[in-house]
Image (tube, rainbow, N blue to C red):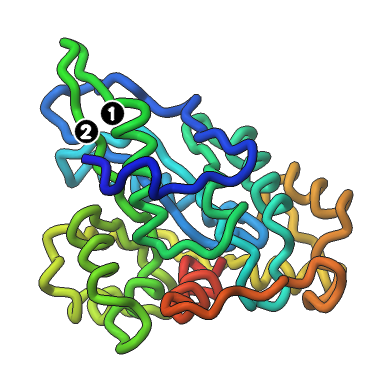
Amino acid sequence: MAAQSSSTFANPPNYTFTSHRLHRTLHASDKQPIVLVACGSFNPITYHHLRMFEMANDFVRQNTNFEIVGGYLSPVSEEYEKPGLVRAHHRVNMCTLATEQESSGLMVDSWEAFQNYQRTAVVLDHFDYEINTVLGGVSTRDGEHRDVRIMLLAGSDLISTMSEPGVWSHNDLDRILGRYGTFVIERTGSSMDQATDSLARWRNSIYPIPQLVQNDVSSTKVRLFFRRGLSVRYLIPAAVIDYIKQNYLYLDDGSGPEKEKGKDKESGEAETSLRDGGSLLQL
């Protein structure tokens, strides 16, 4: 099922794919194994980002024939223009602290973070290759091999950009929504119907998830609180707060030493600026 050959994926130095929490054996042999991937800035990660996976897990259990065997955060590369974006290693470290201390199943993959900008479709191809080709997928309790379906976990405001001309290429949309599929978390202020109506050709692989408890916590607001000296306790994990303070992050608007380096202006730049500038649950 892997989308590309191994030679296509150039790994960052010292990169190792994280899989210590990936369930290699299905609990129910009649279900299709899936892995959820959330791409974004995570600048910084918040409890709302972690809640995305909980909402998706509830939805999957109650409404689908899928079984979630893993969940990943994939922080975006620092090499694109976004004021206030801290260096990739900080965001990877913060995500790792959050997942290891606040979750029993989530993992962080640094492949996207430590190299040039990669389009979302390519990131999903990377997960498909690592999990299904390198690791060999998963197995049932009877030893039967199963390929894992990789699925994007995103906010409805991100999905709404997919119908905007010039933002996403048709080929990438067909890979993301057709080959892989997505779970769409309702976002305060974004219409779920408007976000999915224009993508009707892929309706069978788009799974809208209502947000039963409205939550508009965003990384943007957290950064603003830090700059104003306000408390962010209970908005982001305590270990992440400590890390931010120890490394003097988010003290200004991004004009200091942590300012972004600038990103290659390829055809996917518009996608990234929308995806990571506030479209994946206001990352």
Front one among 36 and 51:
36
Q: In this picture, is 246 found above or below 254?
A: above
Mark 2 — residue? 147
Q: In this picture, is 202 found above or below 180?
A: below
Horizontal side, residue 74 vs residue 135: left or right = right
**Residue displayed at 18% across by 60% down:** 178
Q: Quadrant of the N terminus?
A: top left
Disc marking residue 137 = 1
Disc 2, SS: loop
**Residue displayed at 59% across by 61% down:** 77
The answer to whether residue 228 is seen in the rendering is: no
* Residue type of the residue flagged with mark 1: Gly
Q: In the rendered structure, are the residues bearing label 1 and label 2 in contact, judged by CB atoms less than 8 Å apart?
A: yes
Horizontal side, residue 250 vs residue 143: left or right = right
Disc marking residue 122 = none
**Residue displayed at 35% across by 34% down:** 131
Q: Quadrant of the C terminus?
A: bottom right
